[in-house]
Amino acid sequence: MLPRLDKPSILDIGCGPGAPTLELARLSNGDVTGLDIHQPSLEELANKAKEAGLSERIKTINRSMFDLDFPDESFDIIWSEGSIYIIGFERGLKQWRRLIKPHGFLVVHEMVWLNPHPPQEISKYWKANYPGISTVSVKLKLVAKCGYRLLGHFKLPEDVWWVEYYEPLEKRINELRRKYSNDVAALAMLGKEQSEVELFKKYQKWYGSAFFIMQRNNHD
């Protein structure tokens, strides 16, 4: 959905170990800055970039998304895959806009309700863990309100969350339960993680995630 740009400057906010960061560098032939506060993940990204021959185009910065002191209009593209919830969708759109070049782009991956009026059990869970979760239609109104033009959006299929996240998570939980079978605190933490898996199995028709692809309006 993004137009082809000539060697764009990209900021990947909350990059983690950098799977999207590496793909962005490969696809764009641009320079990508991976930003996160977890140093081991940044070191893993740096090692992956070296192995892929992308070290010259990928750099890492250990910095909070609450402390983005880059100059105005520094980036052609800002990418936020599963991280904007930390600062909040509306606040992120507003605060990050100044960092985007005129007519530059913002791509956000965000949790959403797939259907309005969810059952009380799952509604209570998400209100406790991410009060900012809302429907796609609410997010789209915020896109316009915060100074962007929507280029497109799409929901991730339910099986993506299961295959890529919850199934491996459940497998890992079971492994750790055997390893820490005599550790009460560890088992309690693993039980909490398993409860999230069970909620997804039960309510996956109600919530998921979506990508929003936006272009910065050139007027305030």
Image (cartoon, grey):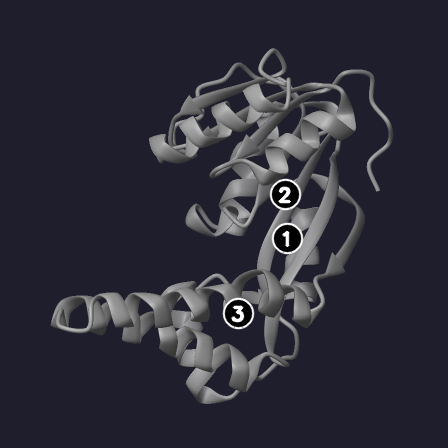
What residue lies at 75% left-to-right and 33% top-to-bottom?
A: 217
- The answer to whether 146 appears left or right of 118 in the picture is right
In the picture, the disc for residue 116 is none
In the picture, the disc for residue 142 is 1
Image quadrant in which you'd find residue 171 = bottom left
Image quadrant in which you'd find residue 137 = bottom right
Q: Can residue 69 be seen in this view?
A: yes
The residue positioned farthest toward the top in the image shown: 56
Choose between 195 and 13: the one closer to the eye.
195
Q: Is mark 2 on a helix, strand or loop?
A: loop
Q: Is mark 1 on a helix, strand or loop?
A: helix
Q: In which quarter of the image is the N terminus?
A: top right
Dot 2 and dot 1 residues touching (CB under 8 Å): yes
Identified by mark 3, the residue type is Glu
Per the image, the residue denoted by label 3 is 167
Per the image, the residue denoted by label 2 is 146
